[in-house]
């Protein structure tokens, strides 16, 4: 019994210590983002790596999700004779929920894992220590541009996912199932509210971007300096960022009400 | 030859030591690496940290560089105690140091030129033209040619070490820390790097502290030797260490004499 209590106690201490570590690391990232020097060139490079190189997967996935939403939405709506609302169903699902969440999960898998692995490998090969010995802060030089790039590109990728999804829904609804194109677009236009739906969507994807950036860079930065450590950091980054995305999705939706 | 120095927890270093480690204790979990280690390194000399694998040679170098903090004890760089400095101040203190890592620690996403130019771009207001001139002068000093656009992964082991040395020296540090400069090199490359390091020490007069388990190169290069054993240090000149009657040193030298380094040593 005493052993059990001791184990629980130590694990709790470890968890609190870990949370303190990530909070302190996050505040350093914010500070380095706001304070000079501004590493614009490195940020642009990282936005290319995390954002531009994720375009294909985001567009393809968005279109596929839109195609499925179109089919499923039509099959449900037609039972109630409401197939003219298909644009609204596809649009609201994508804008409010699927766009930000699925984009975050996709970017976590593609770019978040790569960021954690790259920083972890730099730890294992003493590159971060090399920077420290040159009196260059690795949080400022390496992790901040990567975290900021994930934060900045997530809303844009999410918007692209949504547009691709709407296009996929249009292809199925108008091209395959014979719904009028004008009806699809006007249903979309009439039912999506900019303040509640679009701004809420942007807010969600910005929060998810910050989470993925923070967790991926933190896991890489604290990786054990060996190949197993890099592997654990990469897996941990994907799992933790994905779970955090889903939990924060619920929290934001609940806090902002059904409008978001 | 002197055994591990006495504890001196407070006050600046005495005498002419450029770097001094005082009563340092360090443990990784249950494993105690140093238990009251004290040693000192003279200015403008080549000091070699010698000892068996796993005795803490690289750890000592990382303590001096401030990459590790001791559980107890002091690390002095000149008049400054660095082991308890906040990270920002430590960063400033590190500008006096250069470090060449065993694997080079070059940033593998940047070209060799950008790697060597990085400290100048970060800490000076030099124009790109001046930076290029200084980097190329440094390349020439370490015997590297036509490597500007290459990535570290495209260099051989010896070239990587030279590039790492060029980067460590580009800001003209007072103290150069070098971790296992000869590991993984063929005998000819060992001689080349050795000559390069001695040349740098003689021409620039910087304090050079290197870890090594290569007896031959230690005998040829070292002005003084810090022999690590059982978490403590024994300090002396090469002659003193070779003539030591301490059984631990004798055992190490005998083992080295029967190993592949014998040819180099003789």
Image (tube, coloured by chain):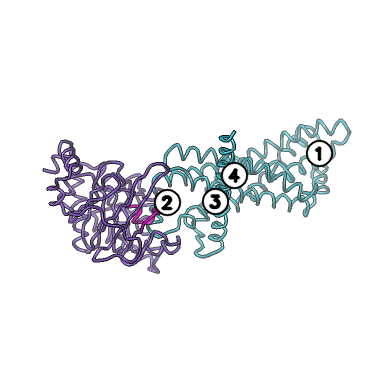
Locate residue A240 relative to residue B198 in the image: left or right: right
**Residue on which the image places disc 4:** A55
CA gap between label 4 and label 3 equals 32 Å
Side of B68 where A232 appears, left or right: right
Indicate yes or no whether the magenta region holds residue A29: no
Return the residue found at the far front. Answer: A2
Residue at 64% in and 50% down? A156
Pair 3/2: label in front: 3
Q: Looking at the image, do the residues carrying marks 2 and 4 touch, with CB atoms under 8 Å apart? A: no
- Judging from the image, mark 1 belongs to the subunit labelled A
Q: Are marks 3 and 1 in contact (CB under 8 Å)?
A: no
Q: Is residue A3 left or right of residue B41?
A: right
Q: Which chain is cyan?
A: A
Marks 1 and 2 sit apart, C-alpha to C-alpha, by 52 Å
Which badge, 1 or 4, is on the more N-terminal residue? 4
**Which residue has dot 2 on it?**
A128
Percent of width and height locating residue A104: 63, 44
| Structural crowding at the residue carrying mark 1, measured as other residues with C-alpha within 10 Å and reported as few (<14), some (14–19) or many (≥20) | many
- Between disc 3 and disc 1, whose residue precedes? 3
Give the letter of the chain under mark 3. A
Name the residue located 18 percent from the left edge and 48 percent from the top edge.
Answer: B217
Badge 3: residue crowd in 10 Å (few <14, some 14–19, many ≥20): some
> Which secondary structure, mark 1?
helix
The secondary element bearing badge 4 is classed as helix
Chain shaded purple: B
Which segment is the magenta one?
Answer: B61-73
Work out whether disc 1 and disc 4 sit on a shared chain: yes
Q: Chain of mark 2?
A: A
* Residue A129 x %, y %: 40, 52
Give the mark nearer the N terminus: 3 vs 2: 3
Residue B57 lies left or right of residue A140; in this view the side is: left
**Circle 3: element type:** helix
């Amino acid at each position: 019994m005493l052993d059990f209590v001791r184990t629980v106690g130590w694990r709790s201490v470890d968890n609190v210590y870990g949370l303190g570590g990530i909070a302190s690391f996050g505040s350093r990232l914010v500070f380095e983002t706001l304070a000079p020097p501004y590493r614009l060139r490195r940020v642009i490079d990282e936005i290319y790596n995390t954002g531009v190189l994720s375009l294909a997967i985001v567009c393809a996935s968005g279109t596929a999700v839109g195609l499925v939403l179109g089919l499923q939405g039509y099959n449900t709506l037609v039972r109630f004779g409401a197939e003219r609302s298909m644009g609204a169903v596809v649009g609201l699902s994508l804008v409010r929920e699927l766009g930000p969440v699925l984009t975050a999960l996709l970017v976590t898998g593609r770019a978040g894992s790569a960021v954690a692995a790259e920083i972890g490998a730099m730890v294992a090969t003493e590159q971060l220590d090399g920077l420290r010995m040159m009196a260059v802060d690795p949080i400022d030089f390496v992790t901040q541009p990567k975290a900021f790039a994930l934060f900045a590109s997530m809303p844009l990728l999410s918007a692209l996912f949504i547009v691709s999804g709407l296009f996929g829904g249009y292809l199925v609804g108008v091209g395959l199932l014979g719904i009028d194109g004008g009806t699809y677009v006007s249903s979309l236009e009439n039912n999506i509210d900019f303040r509640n739906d679009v701004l809420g969507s942007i807010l969600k994807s910005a929060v998810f971007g910050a989470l993925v950036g923070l967790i991926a860079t933190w896991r890489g930065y604290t990786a054990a300096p060996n190949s197993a450590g890099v592997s654990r950091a990469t897996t941990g980054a994907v799992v933790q960022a994905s779970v955090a995305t889903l939990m924060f999705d619920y929290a934001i939706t609940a806090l902002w009400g059904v409008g978001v | 030859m002197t055994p591990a120095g006495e504890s001196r927890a407070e006050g600046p270093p005495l005498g002419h030591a450029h770097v001094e480690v005082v009563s340092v204790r360090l443990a990784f979990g249950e494993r105690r690496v140093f238990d009251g280690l004290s040693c000192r390194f003279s200015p403008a000399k080549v000091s070699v940290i010698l000892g068996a694998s796993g005795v803490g040679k690289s750890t000592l170098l990382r303590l001096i560089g401030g990459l590790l903090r001791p559980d107890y004890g002091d690390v002095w760089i000149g008049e400054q105690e660095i082991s308890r400095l906040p990270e920002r101040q430590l960063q400033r203190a590190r500008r006096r140091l250069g470090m060449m890592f065993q694997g080079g620690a070059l940033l593998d996403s940047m070209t060799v030129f950008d790697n060597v130019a990085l400290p100048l771009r970060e800490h000076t207001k030099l124009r790109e033209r001046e930076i290029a001139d200084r980097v190329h002068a440094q390349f020439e000093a370490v015997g590297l040619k036509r490597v500007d656009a290459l990535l570290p992964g495209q260099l051989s082991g010896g070239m990587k070490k030279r590039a790492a040395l060029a980067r460590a020296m580009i800001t003209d540090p007072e103290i150069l820390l070098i971790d296992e400069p000869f590991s993984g090199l063929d005998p000819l490359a060992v001689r080349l790097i050795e000559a390069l390091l001695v040349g740098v020490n003689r021409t620039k007069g910087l304090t050079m502290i290197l870890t090594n388990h290569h007896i031959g190169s230690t005998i040829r290069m070292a002005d003084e030797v810090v022999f690590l054993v059982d978490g403590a240090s024994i300090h002396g000149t090469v002659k003193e260490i070779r003539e030591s009657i301490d059984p631990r040193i004798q055992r190490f030298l005998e083992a080295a004499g029967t190993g592949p380094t014998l040819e180099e040593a003789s």
